Every structure is written in C-alpha cells, then in structure tokens.
Image (tube, rainbow, N blue to C red):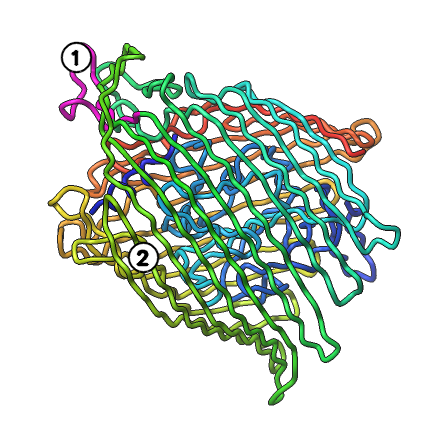
Amino acid sequence: MTGLLKASAAIAAVGAATPVLAQDTQLAPIVIQSEGAGNGSDQTAVAPVRGYVGRTSSAGSKGNTPVNEIPQSVSIIGQQEFQDRGITNKVDELLRYTPGVVAQPFGSDPDTDWYFIRGFDATQTGVYLDGLNLFAYGFGGFQIDPFMLERVDVLKGPSSVLYGGANPGGLINLIRKRPTDDPLYYTETGINSNGNAFFGFDFSDAINEDGTVNYRLTGKVAGGDNYSDFSEDLRGFIMPQVTFTPDDATSLTVWGYLGGLDQVHTGNGFFPYVGTVVDAPFGKIARDAFYGEPDIDTGEYVQKMLGYELEHEFDNGWKVSQNARYGHLWKHEEGPYLNGYVGGVPTAPDYLLARIGFEATSEADSFAIDNRAEQEFELGGATHNLMVGLDYKYYTLDHVQACCGATPISATDPVFGVPQGPNFVYLDQVVTQNQVGLYAQDQIRFGDGWLVTLNGRYDWVSTDSEAAVGPTYDTIDRALSGRAGLAYEFDNGLTPYVSVATFFNPLIGTAARGALEPEEGEQYEAGIKYEPTFIDGSITASVFHISKRNNLVSMPAPLFTQDQLGEVESRGFELEGKVNLNENWRILGSFAYTDMEITKNPLNTALIGNSPFIVPDVTASLWVDYAFTTDALQGLSLGAGIRYQGESWADEANTRKVPDATLFDAAIRYQKDDWSASLNVANVFDEKYVSACQSLTGCGYGDARTVTFKLSKKW
C-alpha cells in the first residue's frame, strides 16, 4: 500500500552497571551500557545510547550538544530500545512510544514510513539521515531499514534555522551505524507470524595493525508474506563503510549503500469509513482484505547512496566538519486502489467498491552537503560556542503518473482478474529544487548557569518544473529564519527553558494562482528538562504553540485544485521520561496532548475552528523492562508496554470520528554467552482498530497482533 496522501498530492499537482550504592549518604548515578552494536560513550551525537537515556544530540544544534542545552524538546531512541521492543521491520515502528509523534497512521505500509510531528505531516520534508535531508516529493522518497541505524533523534518544532526548508512540526534524524574501535561480528535471523523472515549481519574491525583504518559492513535480506491477502515482499540492503583516523584531530568516513524492494502492496489504508470504523450492512471489512489486482499489483524500488564525513580540529581550537551524500532512486508503482463505494453508499447485493487504476514511475537524484566551523571562546564575561555553516541541497524528480482505468469490486465477494480499463497519463514532469543556506549559531554561557542560544539563517531556494503533461513553472524564494532560547541550569539537574523559532517550508506544485509559495510561521515553546543527579534518567515536559501560514486548502472547483489561503495552529503539551533505574529495570513513559485548529480558510469559512484529520488529541505510552540477574534466571528479560491513542477526526468537516484504542505489547528475551533469543508480540490481544482516516474513503486499520522471533549471535 502506498498512502493515499501521496497519490492525492500527486494528482493535485496536475492543478550494565551495579545497583545504586549509598556512599556518604549520597546516591551514585546508574550507568547502563547498551547491548546494541557499537562502541563509545554517549558523549557524541552519533554514539550508542546507554540503555534508554540519550544525553547528547545534534538534531537541535548540528553539534555534540547535551540535550538539556537544546532549547527545544528532543527524544532519542537507541539500540537498547530497538532490541527490547523487537524492531526489525520499519523505522516508523520505533516511534510508537515517542510523545508528539504519530507513526504509522495508516497501519504498516511496507514501502513508506509515515510520521506526523506535533500534528504536521513530516513524511516527505521532515526525515533526515545523518543530518542531511532525505527530501521526497510524490513517490520519489527513500526508505531506510532500521537495521542500518544506531539511533534515531527526534527534534520537536521548527528547524529551519539549522536546516533551511523543513517541516514545522519537527524532524526525525536517522543516525546510521559507524565503524567501531573494537572488533564486532554480529548476525541475526528471525521470522514473524505473517511468515516474513529476515537475516542480517553486521561486522566491524580494524584493517591495519595500528588501528587507524576501520571498516564496517552491514547488510540484511528479508521477505515473505505480509498481513494482507496476496501481499508479499522481498527486500534487502548492504552498506559498506571505511573510517580513517590518522590522528586524534582528524577523521574521514566514506560509506556506500545499495537497497531494493519488490512487493505486492498491502490492501490497507484505502478502506471506507463505513465498513471499518462503523458497520456497513454486511458488517466490517476484514483487516487483511485485499481489493487490488494481485496479477497486476507491483511495487519496486532500487536505492543507491554514496557519502562521506570529514572532521578536523586545528591547533587554534577551530573544528571544521563536512558531510555529503548523493542518492539515486528508481521506483515503480502499479495497481488499482479503493475510492469508496460505487454510488457513495454500500448497496446490496454486491456492495461494490469503486477503484482507481494507478501507475507511476519515478526517478530521483539528490545531493546534499553541509560545511561547519566551530570554536569556543571567552568574550565579555561569557563563554561562546560559535558555529557558522554553509549547506546546499539538490533534488530532482523525473516522474510519470497515470490513472483512472479500473473496474469496481465486491466488498463481500471479490473477483480478481477482470480486465481493467486503460490508464491515461495525467502527469509527465521533471521537478528540480536547489537550496543554499548560510547559518550561524551562538550558545552563550554566563552568570551561574544561564544559557542563551541564538540562531540565524538565510536561504535561497529555486524550484522549477518542466512538463510534457502538467504544470510548468520557475520560482525563486528567499527566507530568513531565527531562533532564540533562554535556559537556566540548576545544580540539581533541573533546566527550565523558553524559546521562539520561525520556519519556512518551500513547496513543489501549483495552486490556483500559480506556483506554490513556502509555508511559514513560528513556534513558541517552554519547558523543563530534568536529569536527576541521583539516578540515570531524563524527564522532559514542554508546552508549545505553532502557527502555520500559507496552508493549502481545497477549492470547490475545478476538481483537485487548491490555493494557499489557510492558516493552522497547533498547541499542546508533551511529557517524556526515560530511566535506567538499575541493572534490572528500564522504564520509559510518555504523554502528549495536541490541539490542532484551522484558524483561516476564506474558501470555506465553515471549516474555521475545525481540527485537521488523522492526528489524535491524546497519545500515551509506557514500557517497562526487567532483566533477571540471579543465578537461576540470569540472562532472562521480560518487557511489557501499553500504547493509547485518543480520538481523531476522520473528515475535514469534523462530522465523523475515529475512536480511541488501547494496545498492549510484550517481550521475552534470553541471553547466554554470545547467543540471544527474543520473542516480541505487538498488539498482544489483537485489538482490531482503525488507526486513522484521511477522508471518509481513506481509512487504515492499525497493526494486527504480530509475533516476531529473533535469534542472534556475537562472534
């Protein structure tokens, strides 16, 4: 299944430590070393996370910055969470327990990872790999396997001051595994209850005797059945890397990546509201139903990347960094998808469902490079950590899309193999976007714990379209972005902060009055970050208010046209806690309240005051993990989690709702010597629920109960 949001957007383009010890009446902090692959301490933004508690991130600063010094909310998911929660398939599964993030709103979509952050869709403009944007438009988006990642950092709120055009709700920075200082030889294999199996390997070691050249080779192959009838896939990747460190001041890493997918799509995500959320006359559509054409349905992609990272620190204290990545994607999609009932309502005896034929071929090339210089110095009685940078991003997409030739199909007695009508090409277009940004950041310490963060950035963006069929345009946009943050660090680990940030997000496409203008707006945020001195933990509470202007609104006529006349506000509260309590207990919990409101829509004033669909008003989660350390049960670990998603709206007019749902997850693991076996169960009680609707004809069931067994060994 490829999400209807992408299809509709494309059509619219036509128009281990010991227990705590008491010592002199003071408690020592607990330090848990992650069992995930990799070496190093959590002192850099790419290092493995110790247990559940990540203390350093680059997502909100582009440097190795303690999380409590970033004037925005940051969530970090490390390898220990990967392993404890049994994440083997998709990155968006990782974020089910992250506050402010709605992941997999249409269920598990094998070829796309879906994210909404603070109410805004970040799927195409808010995903980064090692700090460089994995920009996507239409179907031209890359997909990353979680096995190639060391950790995932989530920055909440605008990030234009550091990255240029970006999603207003925040960004997700995927951080890949890197060559290690110590030898690492790791393999894993497993299978889930759908019959989808996997095998992965991860090797790292020194190439030369003095250890100045290290390599890492990571790869995976997976395939089998998916939860929908007829759906299956075969996927894999390989990622070689080499790091050269001639001295303590210099490091160069060169890496490559090749990945691919061949699938029959899942049938989820296009189901009608009547028949999923509420009963149709025939009851409910089966969660594993497939209403495409198995002999026609195709989903393929080939992804290639090549990149490097270079760092050098001069004797005078200046540190310079440069990272770059080139990517190429070829992707082909074909097959009909659902579009509600014929006639708009389910009608006996066949209860025919309407279908839209679809085919698309996309070829995307992207290049991104970021150059930074950093220096710390004293001036005016304050300590300044200054960073200046220049980055460049290029993205071009050559895509052809065709649609609309399809026959209806019965909801209760589907017949496959009926000849389909021809599709017609409605889009044959090459779009190109270039972005150049110049930015600066100063983190200023003064007094006895005060910290001021100041950011400024100027961007130049050009977007053009050449089309044999579809819109042609050429635009140039310029934008200034800023951020100011103020925090005070108390000796007890408590850091209250406030910040204000502006953003812009350049768009590809056209509206009724011509090429789209960038979205723009600002966020106000206040919060408290607490890192207790008596335990290894982190607690963050934040409130925020985001205003987005130039929001796209649909026009009544002609069909599939839109204009930038709307404004949307997002307000809310988020709470997250992660604790490595001792060598036995690890705990994480979260709560988020998000209030989205349409504040301006001159084309349809009846929508003012309504909330956008998909995003629930409340989400909450709790995960508890216990490791036995006694002789009889040593090596055994048990984990249990609960996830709650509140109600969300199913349509723009706010006439229908998607009800709330509570889900339970569980895990059991056993480790002995270098062997480890785990059994994870998502949605233990097989709760049948709709995760979200993007219209009354576009609803998706949430994850069914899935059991995953994994066996791994360190060599």
Distance, label 1 to label 2, CA atoms, is 49 Å
Q: Is residue 687 left or right of residue 515?
A: right
The quarter holding residue 69 reads bottom right
Q: In this view, does 462 lie to the left or right of 625?
A: left
Q: In this view, does 166 lie above or below 78?
A: below
Numbered range of the magenta stretch? 336-355
Magenta span contains residue 352: yes
Magenta span contains residue 279: no
Q: Position of residue 226 (x, y in %)?
A: 48, 22
Q: In terms of secondary structure, where does tag 2 sit?
A: strand
Which kind of residue does numbered mark 2 sit on? Asp
Which of 579 and 189 lies nearest the eye of the viewer? 189
The quarter holding residue 488 reads bottom right
Q: Residue at x 74, y 65 (%)?
A: 250
Q: Is residue 620 above or below residue 705?
A: below
Q: Where is residue 420 in the image (x, y as percent from the top left)?
A: 25, 19
Screen quadrant of the C terminus: top right
Q: Which residue is drawn at 23% across and 38% down?
A: 426
> Mark 1 near mark 2, Cβ–Cβ under 8 Å?
no
Residue to which mark 1 is pinned: 348
Q: Is residue 167 left or right of residue 148?
A: left
How packed is label 1: few (under 14 Cα within 10 Å), some, or many (20 or more)? few
Which of 272 and 266 lies nearest the eye of the viewer? 266
Residue 715, labelled with which disc?
none
Which kind of residue does numbered mark 1 sit on? Ala
Q: In terms of secondary structure, where does tag 1 sit?
A: loop
Q: Where is residue 490 in the image (x, y as percent from the top left)?
A: 62, 71
First-in-chain label (1 vs 2):
1
How packed is label 2: few (under 14 Cα within 10 Å), some, or many (20 or more)? many
Q: Which of marks 1 and 2 is in front?
A: 2
Residue 464, labelled with which disc?
2
